[in-house]
């Protein structure tokens, strides 16, 4: 369609060329221009943004550093020597957290999918299964994570039952899986329900069974749509892997705790905070990018 | 009921079909016999029950009363294998309902490979043959959102054909299309009719119905008010309601 055709719709424009369709103007709000305060990111506005940012944070830094309590704060929270000593140890122990949340994430994906499918089964026959799935999500979304970890992590090994694992890490993974699967079940369910019923009708009309329709038609579309909220829940899970310290497992937080107590200094906690930020911020940005990409597609794409 | 097919075997027999949605009594006793290779066009105002009738024949909507027999098997009997019946009855929807996450080829091969168990290579070859026959061979690897409405609807028809159905149900398949895209879809249906496919077609395209139908059924208020060869329905309708309906169509410039 010719640029600036002045509102006369061109009936011959082929579908599938959304960027040229005046009904769907491309969003201006790219991340850069939003930080710069909208509008065209010309060279002038870039310089203004840089200058005002430098000035703002410069003044803030000077105010903080020149405040009367700063030396104490610095030596207690940002102690260079303690940081150098504690950081490598904490990073090493963070491996335990990584192991815990990666294993938990794999099981969350499976368990949540199972409950989401249970909950979407139609008809009166499946009522007990639906009730089971609803009860599960209600219960585990309603109890504090630390409580579930305590119940399983302290309780299960205390039973001393034959064949029951005694490892706190094992029960911590079970607890995190149970809690986060409850959240992710709801995420999956929202995805399943967002796929239009006509897709099920089309699949079933071709002779696909209920399960085949779910497996080949509904779930692939549903899962694609829920990747951003799913990753958000995973970031939460990664942070909550620190709760395992409560059971006495020597992971990153526990390590920071030990060093902090020995040094009478809180820098180890700041070190651990840094480790968490290094892994979570890129993921958060990635989720933002996915959401933004989807939004652009929806605004620009022709859904015929 | 006499048809041009005379004593030919009945592809579909519908008797005393009733269907309600809550308080809304949509179908109020439909009786219809369709012979093999017949093309039946269902016409009537929106809400007269055309779509619901087709959806009942495909068992997408459970029926409240009556029975439907397809090629001698009562499909509305309790305990029948619904999936097995649906394989024999293809349906194409107004809104195409292609699977957006699959290529055109995969859309067509999904049911043959998963439901019938056709080996992937064989299903692919058959799908490409269909695409070739209906002029979309170059779109096999495309995703549905890259296709025009007319192309999507043709793919939807092929997707149903890939199951080699005994009967095709077409539910206002051109209603969602831009006017210039209608013809390409109607051409496909004409070709199917010429090849002897038994079809039940709900349509607003009166010219097309007159052209292709062996019989036209006028649905009004959930019953078949009048049926007969297209010359009779369009040339000399017997019922007052049929005359009124056709007069409105003519006034709207659609015939």
Image (cartoon, grey):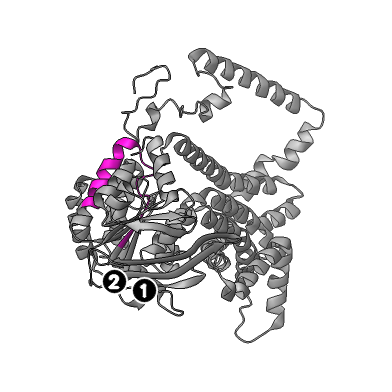
Residue to which mark 1 is pinned: B69
| Marking on residue B10 | 2
Q: Is residue B142 visible?
A: no
The spot of residue B52 in percent (x, y) is 46, 59
Magenta region includes residue B235: no
Q: Chain of mark 2?
A: B
The spot of residue A222 in percent (x, y) is 48, 55
Give the position of the N terminus of chain A as an image quadrant: top left
Magenta region includes residue B179: yes
Rendering quarter of residue B118: bottom left
Q: Are marks 2 and 1 on the same chain?
A: yes
Rendering quarter of residue A210: bottom left
Residue A290 as seen in the image, left or right of residue A139: left
The spot of residue A212 in percent (x, y) is 41, 67
The spot of residue B65 in percent (x, y) is 50, 72
Q: Say few, some or many: other residues with alpha carbon within 10 Å of mark 2 (under 14 / 14 to 19 / 20 or more).
A: some
Give the position of the C terminus of chain A as an image quadrant: top left
Magenta span = B168-190
Q: CA distance from mark 2 to mark 1?
A: 9 Å
Q: Is residue B251 visible?
A: yes
Given residues A54 and A228, the one toward you in this image is A228
């Amino acid at each position: 369609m010719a640029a600036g055709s002045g509102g006369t719709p061109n009936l011959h424009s082929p579908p599938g060329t959304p960027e040229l369709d005046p009904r769907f103007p491309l969003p201006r709000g790219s991340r850069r221009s939003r930080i710069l305060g909208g509008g065209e990111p010309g060279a002038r506005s870039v310089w203004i943004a840089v200058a005002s940012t430098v000035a703002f944070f410069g003044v803030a830094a000077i105010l903080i550093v020149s405040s009367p309590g700063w030396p104490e704060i610095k030596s207690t929270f940002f102690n260079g020597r303690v940081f150098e000593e504690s950081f490598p140890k904490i990073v090493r122990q963070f491996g335990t957290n990584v192991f815990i949340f990666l294993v938990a994430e794999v099981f969350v994906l499976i368990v949540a999918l199972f409950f989401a499918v249970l909950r979407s089964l139609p008809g009166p026959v499946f009522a007990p299964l639906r009730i089971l799935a609803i009860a599960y999500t209600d219960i585990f979304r309603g109890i504090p994570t630390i409580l579930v970890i305590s119940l399983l992590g302290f309780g299960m090994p205390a039973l001393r039952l034959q064949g029951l694992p005694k490892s706190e890490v094992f029960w911590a993974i079970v607890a995190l899986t149970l809690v986060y699967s409850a959240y992710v079940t709801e995420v999956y369910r929202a995805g399943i329900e967002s796929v239009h019923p006509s897709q099920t009708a089309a699949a079933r009309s071709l002779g696909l069974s209920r399960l085949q329709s779910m497996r080949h038609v509904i779930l692939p579309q549903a899962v694609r749509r829920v990747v951003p909220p799913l990753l958000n829940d995973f970031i939460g899970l990664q942070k909550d892997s620190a709760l395992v310290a409560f059971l006495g497992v020597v992971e990153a937080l526990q390590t920071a705790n030990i060093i902090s107590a020995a040094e009478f200094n809180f820098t180890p906690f700041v070190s651990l905070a840094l480790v968490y930020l290094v892994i979570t911020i890129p993921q958060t940005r990635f989720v933002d990018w996915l959401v933004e990409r989807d939004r652009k597609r929806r605004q620009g794409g022709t859904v015929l | 009921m006499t048809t041009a097919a005379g004593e030919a075997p009945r592809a579909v027999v519908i008797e005393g079909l009733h269907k309600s949605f809550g308080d809304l009594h949509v179908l109020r006793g439909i009786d219809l016999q369709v012979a093999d290779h017949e093309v039946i066009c269902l016409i009537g105002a929106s809400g007269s029950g055309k779509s619901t009738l087709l959806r009942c024949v495909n068992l997408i909507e459970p029926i409240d009363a009556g029975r439907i027999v397809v090629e001698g098997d009562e499909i509305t009997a309790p305990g029948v294998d619904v999936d097995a019946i649906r394989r024999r009855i293809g349906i194409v929807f107004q809104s195409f309902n292609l699977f957006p996450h699959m290529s055109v080829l995969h859309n067509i091969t999904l049911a043959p490979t998963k439901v019938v168990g056709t080996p992937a290579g064989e299903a692919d070859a058959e799908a490409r043959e269909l695409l070739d026959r209906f002029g979309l061979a170059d779109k096999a690897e495309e995703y549905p959102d890259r296709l025009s409405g007319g192309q999507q609807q043709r793919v939807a028809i092929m997707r149903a054909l890939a199951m080699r159905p005994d009967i095709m149900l077409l539910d206002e398949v051109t209603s969602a299309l831009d006017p210039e895209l209608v013809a390409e879809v109607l051409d496909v249906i004409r070709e199917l009719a010429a090849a002897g496919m038994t079809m039940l077609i709900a349509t607003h395209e009166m010219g097309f119905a007159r052209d292709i139908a062996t019989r036209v059924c006028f649905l009004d208020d959930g019953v078949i008010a009048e049926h007969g060869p297209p010359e009779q329905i369009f040339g000399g309708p017997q019922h007052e309601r049929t005359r009124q309906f056709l007069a409105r169509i003519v006034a709207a410039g659609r015939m």
